[in-house]
């Protein structure tokens, strides 16, 4: 594929859920797209055939530098991460390596190879327990290693912009769901977890009383704006909450998923785990800069995803085999060999 006279963009995590949707939108915008993904959570078939795929890790500095040298990336879209927020307490080294050190490797290469803009998907996990709704002007106080790593990358990008002129756009999405989400991951993506449990004819699992509240966001409310952000001058060197304004409890979500899947199931409540109880964001800044037009009602988005999951079937949830701390690990996350 010739990259002559085309903007060439790198998408890390482009075989994953949100990443593969961003790749599609970049192709529609006329970019030549190079995908780097280690396939730990993504699938190669998620990558559009028009994109150039490289299997590899953002921890591989030599590989990263060789790709930057070969393709002369104009933009970098960094979506690769291990986003199991609750599990991050127990995989601290793994979390910081994959979510912080790997990100810094990309930032270094972006500075050295004169990338014009670095687009980073952070998370509202950086806020921790904070005044609601969460606003970009609040001081982040993350409460888990995942949020700490994301905030550290944000700060590193700010420093790189100040020191070296690397432009950035930072998005803080939250609870994104939709077609191509990995439903076979028991540690993250609650919508996918619920749908997979229904397909496997198992009870829905909820930690605590289910009164935790979140705003669940369809991928079409996120991916197009991430892709186009480099074309929005006012977005440069800014941070944006991005996602839905509609807030639901986890228990309300469970009932909505059951309805979308046309199922009859019971709910099994596990012990409460360490997590932020209520988290939803204000999107005024995003709306003023990006003028969004796409809004997806939860019931419609769940129905679309339900049809996709039924077509593709259940997915086996693998046990994470690199748990570093066993102390206080929820019983439902322990592997049989550890009991």
Image (cartoon, rainbow, N blue to C red):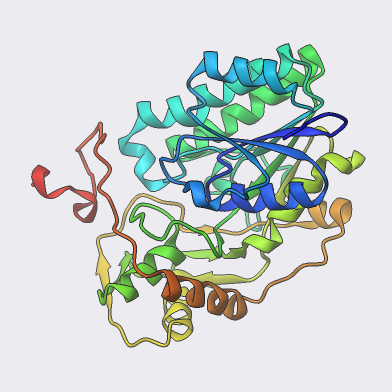
Q: Nearer the viewer, residue 73 or 215?
A: 73
Instruction: Quadrant for residue 313, please give it.
Output: bottom left
Looking at this rendering, what residue extends furthest in the right direction? 233
Q: Is residue 191 above or below residue 303?
A: above
What is the total number of numbered labels drawn onto the structure image? Answer: 0
Residue 282 on image: x %, y %: 71, 57
Name the image quarter holding residue 279: bottom right
Residue 103 vs residue 275: left or right?
Answer: right
Residue 135 seen in the current view: no
Looking at the picture, how far across and down is residue 240, in whole percent? 74, 46
Judged left or right of residue 10, residue 174 is left
Vertical side of 46 occupied by 151: above or below:
above
Decide: is 310 above or below 32.
below
157 horizontally vs 13: left or right: right
Q: Is residue 33 visible?
A: yes
Q: Quadrant of the N terminus?
A: top right
Q: Nearer the viewer, residue 183 or 38?
A: 38
Decide which of 3, 132 is in the foreground and name it.
3
Q: Position of residue 323 (x, y in %)?
A: 25, 36
Residue furthest to the front: 1
Which residue: 82% across, 45% down?
30
Q: In the image shown, does 309 or 153 lie closer to the viewer?
A: 309
Q: Position of residue 223 (x, y in %)?
A: 69, 54
Name the residue located 49 percent from the left edge and 19 percent from the top edge. Answer: 60
In percent of the image, x 72 and y 24: which residue is there?
158
Instruction: Report whether 62 appears left or right of 31.
Output: left
């Amino acid at each position: 594929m010739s990259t002559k006279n085309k903007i060439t963009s790198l998408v890390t995590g482009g075989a994953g859920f949100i990443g593969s949707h961003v790749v599609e939108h970049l192709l529609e915008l006329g970019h030549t797209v190079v995908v780097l993904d280690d396939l730990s959570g993504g699938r190669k078939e998620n990558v559009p055939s028009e994109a150039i795929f490289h299997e590899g890790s953002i921890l591989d500095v030599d590989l990263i530098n060789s790709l930057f040298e070969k393709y002369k990336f104009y933009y970098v879209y960094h979506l690769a991460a291990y986003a199991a927020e609750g599990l991050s307490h127990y995989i601290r080294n793994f979390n910081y390596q994959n979510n912080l050190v790997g990100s810094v490797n990309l930032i270094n290469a972006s500075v050295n190879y004169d990338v014009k803009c670095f687009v980073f998907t952070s998370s509202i996990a950086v806020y921790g327990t904070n005044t609601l709704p969460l606003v970009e002007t609040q001081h982040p106080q993350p409460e888990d290693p995942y949020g700490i790593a994301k905030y550290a990358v944000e700060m590193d990008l700010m420093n790189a912009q100040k020191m070296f002129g690397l432009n950035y756009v930072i998005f803080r999405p939250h609870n994104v769901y939709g077609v191509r989400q990995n439903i076979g991951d028991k540690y993250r993506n609650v919508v996918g977890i619920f749908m997979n449990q229904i397909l496997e004819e198992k009870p829905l699992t909820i930690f605590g009383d289910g009164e935790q509240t979140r705003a669940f966001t369809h991928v079409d409310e996120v991916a197009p704006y991430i892709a186009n952000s480099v074309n929005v001058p006012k977005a440069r060197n800014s941070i944006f909450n991005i996602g839905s304004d509609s807030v639901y409890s986890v228990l309300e979500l469970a009932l909505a998923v059951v309805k979308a899947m046309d199922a009859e199931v019971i709910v099994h409540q596990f012990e409460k785990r360490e997590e932020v109880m209520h988290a939803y964001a204000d999107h005024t800044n995003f709306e003023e800069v990006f003028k969004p037009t796409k809004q997806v009602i939860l019931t419609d988005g769940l129905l679309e995803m339900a049809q996709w999951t039924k077509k593709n079937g259940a997915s086996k949830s693998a046990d994470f085999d690199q748990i570093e701390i066993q102390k206080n690990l929820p019983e439902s996350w322990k592997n049989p060999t550890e009991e």
